[in-house]
Image (tube, helix red, strand yellow):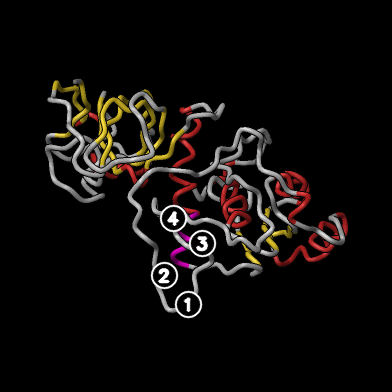
Amino acid sequence: MLAVTIARFGGPDVLTVTDLPAPEPGPGQVSINVTHAAVGLAGVLMHRGEFGGAPPLVPGLEVAGTVPALGDGVTGLRIGEPVVTLSRPTAGGYAEVSTADAAITISLDDTDLDPALAVAALPNATTAVLALATVAHLQPGERLLVHGALGALGTVIAHVGRHLGAGRIIGTVRRAEQADTARQRGYDEVVLADESSKADANSIRSTSSSTPSVARYAPPAWAPSLRSAGSSASATPARPRTPASAATTSGWPTPPSSASTPAACSLNTPRSDATPPDEHSNS
């Protein structure tokens, strides 16, 4: 197979196309015929030597493609199934064939989601899930404040927060005219980040519904369910405090049964507004 490799750390010039043997999936893994690989900050840090690992290596974390082979013990996925995933811990995404743990491999079957969009959205979706479920331990009904509601992470974290049972989600924006766009992304309330603009913030609040609720929010029609395959191991809380939701066998949280949440969690919402670059600085 062809792969982009790094023999030494440095700038983009260290990326070299090389012919390598295709990796085989180990127990609990799947191999993936890669159709799309995300190119982002992690890949840059890898070839600069700031992400860990040692050359020679194949960079690239997030990939989409189809499954040509299953490792021992893998259930819930089939040969030929379209998927999106994080490639194995040692990276390996910039290649024609990659491997990944089945537990974090998400099926795109029965969805209309473009794999290019899925693989591009995966980093921020993963960050949002980890931040809310395993770091903040968001509890059902708790309020959630997100700074930079229209940033790359801000546009997905409201969807994930709703999926995990957040009671009221508040986002900050830089300009009053951005409030309506933020509400369309799932925010119940929008305020200006500039504390000196309290009058404008009050104006924003007054134009929103007096009784915002989960019922008026729905993820995009193309948003897939975050179902994935893996072992049947039971989940245990990471800390004494009850987590916002139990972890599935794949590590993806599921919403509590008592919460009024949408059935599917959006990976990301395509941006159609003309938000200035500084609103997207948290990608």
Q: Are marks 2 and 1 in contact (CB under 8 Å)?
A: yes
- Residue interval drawn in magenta: 129-135
Q: Is residue 132 magenta?
A: yes
Q: Which amino acid, mark 2?
A: Pro
Q: Nearer the viewer, residue 138 or 278?
A: 138
Mark 3 sits on what residue?
Answer: 132
The residue to which callout 1 is attached is 241
Residue at image position (60%, 46%) is 155
Q: Nearer the viewer, residue 201 or 224?
A: 224
In this rendering, position of residue 36 left or right of residue 278: left
Residue 46 in the image: above or below residue 32:
below
Among the two numbered marks 1 and 3 on one chain, the one whose residue lies closer to the N terminus: 3
Helix or strand or loop: what does disc 3 sit on?
helix
Which residue is label 2 attached to?
A: 237
SS category of the residue bearing label 1: loop
Q: Secondary structure at mark 2?
A: loop
Q: Amino acid at mark 4?
A: Thr
Q: Residues within 10 Å of mark 2 (few under 14, many from 20)?
A: some
